[in-house]
Image (tube, helix red, strand yellow):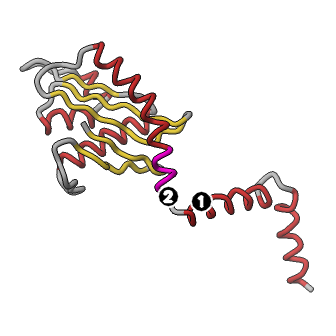
Amino acid sequence: ASVGFVKGEKVTVAAVSGQDIIDKRSNIVKHIRAAQMEVVVSGEAHMYEAPAEGEADEEQMSRSPQHAALAEDGQAKTVYSLPLRHDQDIVGVATFEYQKEPLAGEVRQVLDIVAGQVGPLLYLALQNARAIRQHVQDGAKAVAQKVFGKDHPWRQTFPLKIRTCAAT
C-alpha cells in the first residue's frame, strides 16, 4: 500500500509499505506517482486487474495505462487506487497492490469506506502541520481577493485612476 499527498496539480508519494526511505527516483515510486496522478486527473478510483497468462485486456490498458505499468513493474495481480477526499477536493490518493490474488469485492467496499473516513482526517493533519505564517498568508490572500477581486468595482476604476494620476 502507498499514500500520496495532493498539492495543486502535483502528487507526492509520502509512504510506501515495506520502505523506510522513499527514493523519488526509483522506478516503483515513479510508477506509483503516475498511477496516483491518473486518479487525481480523473477524480475517481481506478482498478487494474492483470489478465491471465497470454491474454491482453486492451480496454483496461487504455483506461488505466499507469496502473497497468505499476502492476507489471511490481508484479501485482491487482492495483487499486482511490482518492482521499475532503468535501469535493482530493487531498490524497491511496494505492493498494495485491500480489497473489485478485481483489475481492468485499475488500474493495471496505477500502472505499475507509477512504471516505481517512480523507477528512488527512486534510486536518495537513492543515495542522502548516506553519502559522502560511495560515496568515491564506487569510491575507482571501481578504485581498475580496477587496480586489474581479467582481469588485474598484478593480475596474483603480487602473483608470493610476493612468489619470500618471498623465498629470
Number of residues whose C-alpha sits closer than 10 Å to that of mark 2, classed few (under 14), some (14–19) or many (20 or more): few
| Quarter of image, res 163 | bottom right
- Magenta span: 124-130
Task: Look at 74% across and 59% down and name the residue there.
Answer: 143
Residue 135: assigned label: 1
Q: Amino acid type of disc 1?
A: His
Q: Say which label, 1 or 2, has the lower sequence index.
A: 2
Q: Quadrant of the N terminus?
A: top left
* Residue furthest bottom in the image: 168
Query: Of residues 55 and 153, which is closer to you in this image?
Result: 153
Find the distance from the CA under tag 1 to the CA under tag 2.
7 Å
Task: Look at 34% across and 40% down and name the residue there.
Answer: 36
Vertical arrangement, residue 104 with respect to residue 141, above or below: above
Residue 128, magenta (yes or no): yes
What secondary structure is found at the residue carrying circle 2?
loop
Vertical arrangement, residue 101 with respect to residue 166, above or below: above
Residue behind mark 2: 130
Mark 1 and 2 residues: CB-CB less than 8 Å, in contact? yes
Task: Look at 27% across and 40% down and name the residue there.
Answer: 2
Residue 36, magenta (yes or no): no
